[in-house]
């Protein structure tokens, strides 16, 4: 066989590259917009009336609303680990909200949504709040993302934390407190002291970066993960929307988030990839109710962030993909953020992780009719403290005995200063999710067979994922990663 000439080699290489380009051209893009602490009723498609959300209304008109969509846990880091890995947070060892002093993070042994996309040579970026470990080994660029820009954890984890300010106002002596809040690019701090003025520009800066990324990578498949820092307290908004909602600062902030969605949708259309892009809009948990006028609404659901009641774990979710998802439709079936990873894998023909995950391919729920049922037989409701507090199935929810936080009808906080929660106790209670989404009528006594079935399911989940309430360790739990003294720290 004769060796190739230089020109033949060049033609051969061009043919390979063209082939890859054509393959990439057939793959759909993915944009996941993840809001922080947004309640079920905080946007127009789910009931908000005090301020306009025209771009989210457009997403609903051109896509599908999901009315029974859940998160793994009603708190930041735990919830985000589920979205990124397709696993309930208990399985990957991430609980609660990791702070600046934390030395743990998402294990490199887990497979993230970005790493799924990397199998098909996607361009990937994370822009916004990460919150799965803030030191270099834990950051997005070490979990499949080509680039990262944003806050490594919540925007209240700084010296001006609202609760610290409340203590100071009461003349209490502050001990410890949070360090300065950093802004990170890839694995380096680019601004060591994020200020209030800087936070006013976060939503705009995140959005501009996302838009630029889409334009730069329009000729190849891409994943944009846009976890906004808002509407988590402290609330900040740019001058573009300050005072524009007529519904206070919270309304202004939601309007700017809505503007961000519009910028993404408009850019997709502008660069000609609108028809081949799945856009998912959802949130990490329900509203932080103690902040009152600086928090949203979970209505008609009970309680909010930090609880296993529906107000904490049922979140507003929209999906839009013009060539695939029927416009102006609604899905009332049970689904969860853990389903995003396996669904994207199926969309692009990527292999699922070798280890066990909990998510299911919900493409039929995204594209099919009302006859399609949820692939989830049951779904555990864990709180961040590793307590199994409830079990969902397609129709019922069994609440397991536990303590939870509540405002108990007390006055809520104002002006960014929270009210104090009380602790309440609940026993074994059963609610019908089809006709009692507010969890107001306990029907356990009327349906002992359903209680028994869901209690058996709870026991199976305890065996698999553990339960602090019953002092159980799960057989299917994998450890998070922990830093050693030799590992690099964020600087």
Image (spheres, rainbow, N blue to C red):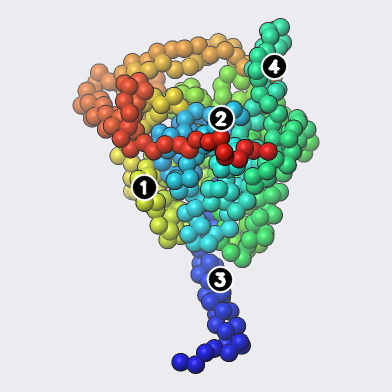
Q: Residue furthest front?
A: 486
Residue that numbered label 3 is attached to: 21
The residues bearing labels 1 and 4 have C-alpha atoms spaced at a distance of 45 Å
Task: Please tell me how crowded label 2 is: few (under 14), some (14-19), or many (20+) other residues with Cα within 10 Å.
Answer: few
Dot in front, 1 or 4: 1
In the foreground, 2 or 174: 2
Task: Please tell me how crowded label 3 is: few (under 14), some (14-19), or many (20+) other residues with Cα within 10 Å.
Answer: some
The residues bearing labels 3 and 2 have C-alpha atoms spaced at a distance of 42 Å
Residue 468 lies, with reference to residue 67, above or below; the image says above
Residue that numbered label 1 is attached to: 355
> Is any atom of residue 60 visible in this view?
no
Residue that numbered label 4 is attached to: 165
**Mark 4 element type:** helix
Q: Quadrant of residue 214?
A: bottom right
**Mark 1 element type:** loop
Q: Name the side, left or right, on which 255 lies relative to 98.
A: right
Question: Is tag 2's residue or tag 1's residue first in the polypeptide sequence?
Answer: 2
**Mark 3 element type:** helix
Q: Tell me if label 2 and label 1 are in contact, CB under 8 Å.
A: no
Q: Quadrant of the C terminus?
A: top right
Q: Quadrant of residue 272?
A: bottom right
Dot in front, 3 or 1: 1
Residue 66's tag is none
The percent position of residue 181, horizontal first and vertical second, equals 69, 31
Q: How many marks?
A: 4
The residues bearing labels 4 and 2 have C-alpha atoms spaced at a distance of 22 Å
Task: Please tell me how crowded label 1 is: few (under 14), some (14-19), or many (20+) other residues with Cα within 10 Å.
Answer: few
Residue 24 lies, with reference to residue 225, above or below; the image says below
In the foreground, 472 or 294: 472
Q: Name the side, left or right, on which 395 lies relative to 147.
A: left
Residue that numbered label 2 is attached to: 102
> Is any atom of residue 422 visible in this view?
yes
């Amino acid at each position: 066989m004769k060796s190739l000439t230089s020109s033949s080699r060049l033609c051969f290489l061009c043919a390979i590259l063209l082939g890859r380009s054509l393959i990439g051209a057939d793959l759909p893009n993915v944009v996941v917009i993840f809001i922080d602490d947004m309640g079920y009723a905080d946007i127009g498609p789910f009931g908000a009336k005090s301020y306009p959300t025209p771009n989210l209304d457009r997403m609903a008109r051109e896509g599908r609303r999901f009315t029974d969509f859940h998160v793994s846990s009603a708190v930041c880091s735990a919830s985000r680990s589920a979205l990124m890995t397709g696993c309930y947070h208990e399985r990957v060892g991430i609980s609660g909200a990791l702070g600046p002093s934390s030395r743990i993070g998402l294990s490199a042994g887990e497979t993230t949504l970005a790493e799924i996309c990397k199998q098909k040579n996607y361009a990937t970026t994370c822009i916004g709040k990460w919150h799965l470990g803030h030191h270099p080994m834990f950051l997005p660029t070490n979990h499949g993302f080509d680039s990262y820009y944003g806050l490594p954890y919540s925007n209240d984890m700084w010296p001006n934390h609202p609760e610290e300010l409340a203590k100071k106002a009461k003349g209490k002596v502050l001990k410890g407190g949070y360090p300065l809040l950093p802004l990170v690019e890839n694995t380096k701090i680019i601004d060591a002291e994020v200020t209030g003025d800087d936070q006013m520009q976060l939503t705009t800066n995140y959005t501009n970066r996302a838009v630029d990324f889409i334009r730069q990578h329009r000729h190849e498949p891409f994943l944009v993960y846009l976890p906004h820092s808002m509407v988590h307290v402290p609330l900040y908004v740019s001058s573009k929307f300050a005072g524009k909602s007529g519904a206070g600062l919270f309304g202004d902030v939601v309007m700017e988030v809505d503007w961000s969605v519009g910028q993404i949708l408009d850019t997709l259309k502008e660069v000609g990839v609108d028809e081949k892009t799945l856009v998912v809009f959802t949130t990490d948990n329900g509203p932080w109710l103690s902040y009152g006028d600086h928090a949203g609404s979970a209505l008609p659901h009970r309680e909010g962030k930090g609880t296993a009641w529906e107000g904490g774990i049922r979140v507003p979710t929209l999906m839009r993909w013009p060539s695939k998802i029927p416009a102006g439709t609604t899905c009332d079936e049970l689904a969860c953020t853990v389903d995003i990873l396996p669904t994207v894998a199926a969309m692009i023909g990527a292999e699922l992780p070798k280890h066990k995950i909990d998510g299911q391919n919900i493409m039929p729920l995204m594209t099919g009719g009302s006859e399609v049922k949820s692939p989830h037989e049951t779904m555990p409701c864990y709180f961040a403290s590793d307590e199994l507090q409830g079990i969902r199935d397609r129709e019922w929810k069994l609440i397991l005995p536990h303590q939870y936080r509540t405002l108990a009808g007390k006055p809520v906080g104002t002006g960014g200063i929270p009210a104090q929660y009380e602790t309440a106790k609940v026993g074994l209670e059963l609610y019908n999710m089809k006709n009692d989404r507010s969890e107001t009528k306990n029907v356990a006594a009327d349906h002992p067979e359903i209680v028994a079935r869901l209690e058996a399911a709870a026991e199976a989940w305890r065996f698999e994922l553990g339960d602090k309430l019953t002092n159980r360790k799960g057989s299917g739990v994998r450890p998070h990663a922990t830093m050693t003294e030799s590992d690099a720290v964020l600087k």
